[in-house]
Image (cartoon, rainbow, N blue to C red):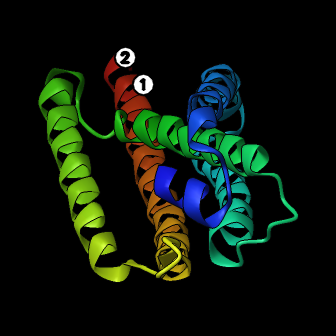
Amino acid sequence: LSAHVQENMGWPRQWLGLLYFCGGAAAFFSMRFTGRLSDRIGYTKTAFYATIGLWLTLYAGFYAQWHAVPVLLVFVLFMVTMSTRNVTTNALISKIPKPQERAGFMSLVSAAQHLMSGAGAMVSTLMLTETPDHRLAGMENIALLSMLGFGASIWLMYRIEKIVSAQACDAVIQAELTQL
């Protein structure tokens, strides 16, 4: 990200700290709101709205690379939408295992996330090239691939939330039946 915002978007290197500070601060505060919103309207619905925002951000800042959109705005929106998706995904995933299996399951999920992050970084290095003027070429392909992946993840979240809800209903029914 830092190479793209510097070389392709023209953000000065000496101001990178400000970019990450603003993005991190916005994500920090938005995560509090995201947690409450997810609990109220559902994880998949919250993630869906965040994905729409992420698609728009990826399109404007990384795919089409519109220079009319301020770099700080693109970066802050990217950080906020990504953290929103992470909060909703982790909250939903934590409902899959039984309480006594949760730590082991979440460790496995974390390992899979790190493995996929590494694979994504490796694949992106194969997709990116540096132009003679030091710009990154190929970022639009990575943005498009990311947009497709985020779209697929919404479908997966919908399926998981449906299964988790059905299991919760079954547990309530079972508890009621045992009390009879």
The secondary structure type at the circle numbered 1 is helix
Residue 101, image x, y percentages: 14, 28
Residue drawn at (38%, 77%), measured in percent from left and top? 128
- Is 79 placed above or below 138 here? above
* Residue closest to the eye, 81 or 167: 81
Residue toward you, 138 or 162: 138
Is residue 67 rendered to the left or right of residue 45? right
Q: CA distance from mark 1 to mark 2?
A: 5 Å
| 92 sits left or right of 117 in the view | right
* Quadrant location, the C terminus: top left
Where residue 108 sits, quadrant-wise, is top left
Horizontal side, residue 34 vs residue 154: left or right: right
Q: Are marks 1 and 2 in contact (CB under 8 Å)?
A: yes
Q: Position of residue 5 (x, y in %)?
A: 60, 55
Could you tell me residue 173's position as x and y percent?
42, 34
Residue holding disc 1: 176
Q: Residue furthest right?
A: 68
Q: At 29% from the left edge and 62% from the top edge, which residue is drawn?
A: 121
**Helix, strand or loop status at disc 2:** helix
**What kind of residue is marked 2?**
Gln
- Mark sitting on residue 179: 2
Q: Position of residue 42 (x, y in %)?
A: 63, 41
The residue at the point 78 percent across, 46 percent down is 73
Observer-nearest of 28 and 11: 11
Residue type of the residue flagged with mark 1 = Glu
In this view, the residue farthest toward the front is 132
